[in-house]
Image (spheres, rainbow, N blue to C red):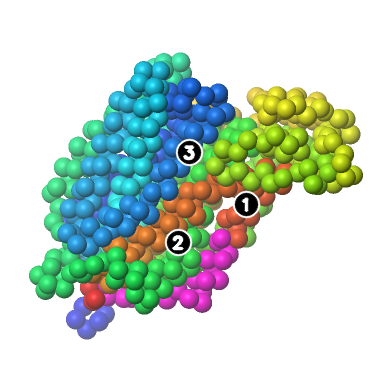
Amino acid sequence: MNANVAAPSGEVRSRPMTREERKVILASSLGTVFEWYDFYLYGSLAVVIGAQFFSAFDVSTRNVFALLAFAAGFLVRPFGALFFGRLGDLIGRKATFLITILLMGSTTFLVGLLPSYDTIGWIAPVALIVLRMAQGLALGGEYGGAAVYVAEHAPQGRRGFYTSWIQTTATLGLLLSLFVILFVRIQVGEEAFRAWGWRIPFLVSIVLLAVSVYIRMQMQESPAFKKMKEEGSLSKAPLSEAFGQWRNLKVVIFALLGLVAGQAVVWYTGQFYALFFLQSILKVDLFTSNVLIAWSLILGTGGFILFGTLSDRIGRKPVILTGCLIAALTYFPLFHYMTQTANPHLSTAIETVKVEVTADPASCGSVFDPVGIRQFTAPCDVARVAMARAAIRYELVPGPAGSPAKVTFNGTEVAIAPALGTNITNFTNAAVAAGYPRAGDPTIVRTETVIPGTMQAWRMVAVLTLLVIYVTMVYGPIAAALVEFFPTRIRYTAMSLPYHIGNGWFGGFLPPTSFAMVAATGDIYFGLWYPVVVALGTVVIGIFFVPETYKRDIFKG
């Protein structure tokens, strides 16, 4: 690998990447792989964990609480960004992201040791939520530290290439968590895995923690921070300087809305909502959907390096905003293609089976429920939520004033029961009778091994890989762009907040919000409007308000 450095005349010339620079990238990237491995473990095992720590509740409620505990990690990420960002600008980059990895690693290990609800009662779920919040706080500080540390070691003109290696770590962390979970499941069996085997991936993380800490202990402080420390020009109040002064605050706002928000929704749509769509809407089994996503990540991950390098040549904005624009313009046809390929009978049924919920509009309320905790009692609302959870496309038809709600499948009425679960069963049976595919329909894409064995499966890998390529376009250059926005004295603090608000809130809540939009409208594709609108908004704001930064000298200021 070659790196570039500015010559005294201002021209850029090539030189080999030094051993120290390789160590910097390795230390930051391995540590961040571990961070994301820990974070994704919980998301992948939320249902299993719900049965362990929320067993006092029924299945639906415990799953909701398990997902809320997962969401708690996203909620606190911006606060972790503020706390650890300030610490990084006060005491140094190296010390701070040593703290974050120790916090993340120890809390993950403790989840594997935590007794279940049946053993210690309500203390178990409370302790789990506390540990999840600690993980979120640590992750809020980790990314900014790694990005700043690598960028401040990178030569001028090669920051996109250097920091793009960090961007691969979220994908690699997800892959690692999927592989470990699948391996343990196969080795111990499904029953044992649900009983105690789920703890093994969490406990194994102690080995990853030891390796990561050892590597980071060998590193030196960033040259930019050392220079400022020697000159006595460190910020004494990075929070107030970053967010209390309009000249810096407006940059934070434009960075959030004009780059990160769009990057976040494209990332979460391509990796997380696509997986949710496969499993919950298209009814692809857990093993197959994970294998398809894993292959798409393997094939597409090199794009992070490609687009990070490209941003060193043509700029950060053209690459990121083009990725947002292409994604927004193609999401609807791509997800339609996914339905036609993964579950062709469902694709046909959506177009041919006429399902109607007819009710007095006054009796229908909002079913928007992004965190899944609302209790619906009105028959109109109960029917619509049940329909969405059964992945049945319906049309809401206004009925006469005072008329009771009714549900029809191709003109045949199906009674609305008081209980949501009963309706899901009844509506599913009615849908199958009307032409929807049954669970386990042989036309639904399936693979028995980790190698997709059919053209149907490989076509799915192809479209999922394209979604991952969109992710690499917007995510590959984002670290370099954010680092270049802010002066060294407040860089860690200022860049971490927009990144984690964008990815923790705009992105982190995309899957439940998009599903809530599906439930509210009856259209399985309606949830895509969330990333489309946000991505297009980012394109507009980015074009007019975000400056290009790829030629900036980050050692000044």
Using the image as rendered, state which of residue 249 and residue 122 is in the foreground: 122
Q: Secondary structure at mark 3?
A: helix
**Residue linked to disc 3:** 68
Q: Which mark is residue 260?
A: 2
Disc 2 crowd, CA 10 A, few/some/many (<14, 14-19, 20+): many
Q: Is residue 125 left or right of residue 63?
A: left
Q: What range is drawn magenta here?
A: 534-554
**238 above or below 192?**
below
State how far apart marks 1 and 2 are (Cα).
18 Å
**Residue linked to disc 1:** 528
N-terminal label among 1 and 3: 3
**26 above or below 554?**
above
Q: Secondary structure at mark 2?
A: helix
Using the image as rendered, state which of residue 374 and residue 421 is in the foreground: 374
Which amino acid, mark 2? Val
**48 above or below 556?**
above
Q: Quadrant of the C terminus?
A: bottom left
